Amino acid sequence: MNIKAYAVAAIASMTLGVLPASAATIVSTLASYNGPEASSGFPIDRGIIGTFNYAIAPGSSITSAFLEGTYGTSTVSSSTASFNASVDGNTAFTVCGLNAMNCYFSGQAYRSFSIALSSATFASLLDGSASLRLIQTSNVNIRYGTPTLRIVTAAVPEPSTWAMMLIGFGGAGAMLRRSKRKTATKVPFVL
């Protein structure tokens, strides 16, 4: 490898080295929810059962978010009424489906779940708090253990970082272009 190739590799590695750390995971948990018993009138809006509070680093963007927890609590560990959830007022989605075997009927205690939130919710999560609303859709009680909001963020490079990166790639490109011109194939002239 010649000196110019080493120089190009060095510039490229320095340019990539100025990018900030890639990702951070933020976790906020609420107390387990044991709702009142109901046998009719579904769906029943149980209201906001709590608010997740967390801190997102300035200049970060959300890449994914998840609502997690368990079907069942210490009160009734093996099942829950079916329910939907809404995070920060966004459209409700099904957490435990009506008569779903994984959550509605008795079974293994404290079955865990993780549901990816839509990217449409990310903008509302950036302020550092998110409310959790539950809507009951079947008989008995909602038993939602350790309601948890998990957010994955990525740092957004600052303008100066982008400038350094562009200068580095521009320099690497110029060196490559220059070295190609000088190493043009020479054909010897033979008489």
Image (cartoon, grey):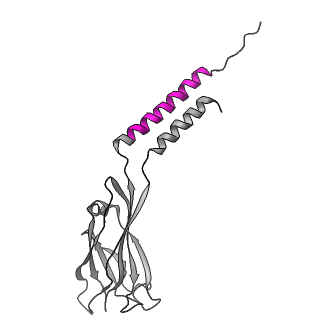
Q: Is residue 183 above or below residue 38?
A: above
9 in magenta: no
Q: Nearer the viewer, residue 182 or 164?
A: 164
Residue 125: where, in percent of width, then height? Answer: 29, 63
* Quarter occupied by residue 83: bottom left
* Nearer to the camera, 119 or 20: 20
Horizontal arrangement in the rendering, residue 181 relative to residue 64 (left or right): right
The magenta span reads 162-191
- Residue drawn at 57 percent across, 21 percent down: 181
**Observer-nearest of 17 and 126:** 17
At 35% from the left and 45% from the top, the residue drawn is 158
Q: Main secondary structure of the magenta part?
A: helix
Give the quarter of the image for residue 139: bottom left
Task: Tell me if residue 182 is in the magenta stretch.
Answer: yes
Q: Quadrant of the N terminus?
A: top right
Which of the 4 image quadrants contains residue 23? bottom left
Residue 166 image offset from top left, x and y in percent: 42, 36
Q: Image height check: is 46 above or below 2?
A: below
Vertical relation: 191 (above or below) 136: above
Q: Residue furthest right?
A: 191
Which residue is found at the position 47% from the left and 35% from the top? Answer: 169
Residue 21 position, x and y percent, is: 43, 53
Residue 53, image x, y percentages: 28, 69
Quarter the C terminus occupies: top right
